Amino acid sequence: MAHFDATSSSRDVSLSFDRREASTGPPPERSTLDAPVDPAVAEVEWLLRYISGIIKQRGREILRDFPITPPQFVALQWLKEHGDMTIGELSEKMYLANSTTTDLVDRMEASGLVRRVRSATDRRVVYIHLLDKGRTIIDAVIRARQRYLAEVLASFAPEDVERLIALLGALYRQMKGEPVSDRNRERRASGAAEGGGRSDQAREEGSDGSADRHP
């Protein structure tokens, strides 16, 4: 795989960390900070950081063609993938204060993207419901993002794309704390049974919507 040149246009890519990356615990010990890092690990960190920045920048450019803001994109995506949510649930997913999420939902409701509905079993509970207009917009945005990635991956061989999916999936599960080794064995067994294709289980694991959602 060609090495991405950090000295080119990537200088303009925003590398600011997402709020969730800020540490809330005590600072690490000095010995930990000074510990040597495997060059391969450093390379992976660098690539992920720059790829994330490029995707974020490109995502914001795509959003210019749609009547929603980056925070609204994130909120609509959660509602699309997880269904009705309370303000508290959406705030937790977006790493926002309830008051901030309330303002965000107010604006989306005024735009006809969502509406508030009361629980049928507990009238004290209010859910945020995705309306057809909001679903149509979020679907269109995601398709535009997918088309961008299709252009990027057009020069990759199909088997390389499948390998990339497998490796990214393994990394994703490892970062979530799932046992990667067991999943890899299942993937290999499924691939052998299906002629090496990507298993349905792997597709389901990659579609739960819990990955980073910055635009």
Image (cartoon, rainbow, N blue to C red):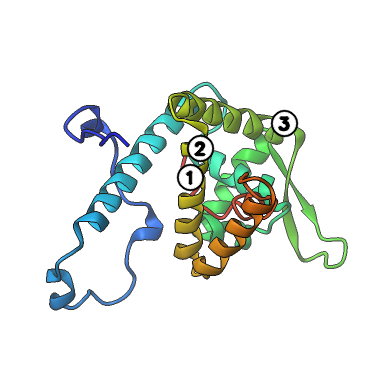
- Residue type, numbered disc 1: Arg
Cα separation, mark 2 vs mark 1, equals 6 Å
- Residue type, numbered disc 3: Lys
Please tell me whether residue 112 is drawn above or below residue 202 in the rendered image: above
Residue highlighted by disc 3: 133
Pointers 1 and 3 in contact (CB under 8 A)?
A: no
80 relative position to 141: left or right: right
13 relative position to 173: left or right: left
Pointers 2 and 1 in contact (CB under 8 A)?
A: yes
Residue highlighted by disc 2: 159
- The answer to which of 143 and 214 lies nearer the viewer is 143
Q: Position of residue 165 (x, y in %)?
A: 51, 45
- The answer to which of 205 and 68 lies nearer the viewer is 205
Residue at image point 19% right, 64% down: 37
Residue at image point 51% right, 61% down: 173
For residue 163, the mark is 1
Q: Position of residue 45 (x, y in %)?
A: 29, 53
Specify the farthest residue to the right.
120
